[in-house]
Image (spheres, grey):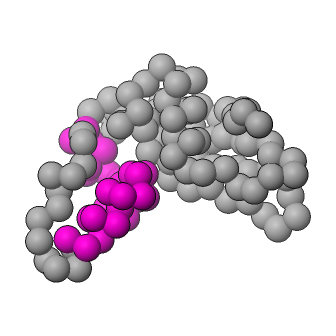
Amino acid sequence: MPLKIEITEEKRNPLIERTEITFRIDHFGEGTPNRLDVKKKIAAMQGSNEKLTIVRNISTHFGRSYTIGKAHIYQDSRELQYFEPLYIQIRNLEKEKRTEIYQLKRRKEPFKHLFEY
């Protein structure tokens, strides 16, 4: 079933140069949608760069058939790296890159080159 995202609130933050979005996803009879799928869909809906789109949180309460979440869309990669915590940036990557970053971080080796901003 295709992902149907309804944007409930959209706020422009000119000081940080980002757009803050609150959204709702109805998924009756299915599990909570994947964060990367939501990220791609929101970037496509807003006409923004997928790499500069960050899904902050996705939450589904027990027994409910909808999910509520927040996303930030940045205009500049420097602003994204400054304002978003590292763990949120890592969560918004593919699984292979996440595991590679965690392994490099564990060995205390540099890993910033794996981000594609």
Q: Residue at x 66, y 40 (%)?
A: 23
Residue that sits furthest to the left in the current view? 109
Overall secondary structure of the magenta stretch? helix
Magenta-drawn stretch contains 108: no
Q: Give the magenta-colored segment's residue range.
A: 77-104
Q: Quadrant of residue 24?
A: top right
Q: Position of residue 97 (x, y in %)?
A: 32, 57
In which quadrant of the rendered view does residue 101 lie?
bottom left
Extreme residue toward the top, this view: 47
On screen, residue 115 versus residue 28, left or right, reads: left
- Residue at 38% x, 28% y is 49
Q: Please tell me whether residue 116 is drawn above or below residue 57 in the rendered image.
A: above
Q: Nearer the viewer, residue 96 or 58?
A: 96
Residue that appears at 56% across and 42% down: 37
Foreground of the two, 84 or 115: 115
Image coords of residue 92 (percent x, y) = 43, 51
Residue 19: horizontal and vertical position, in percent? 46, 33
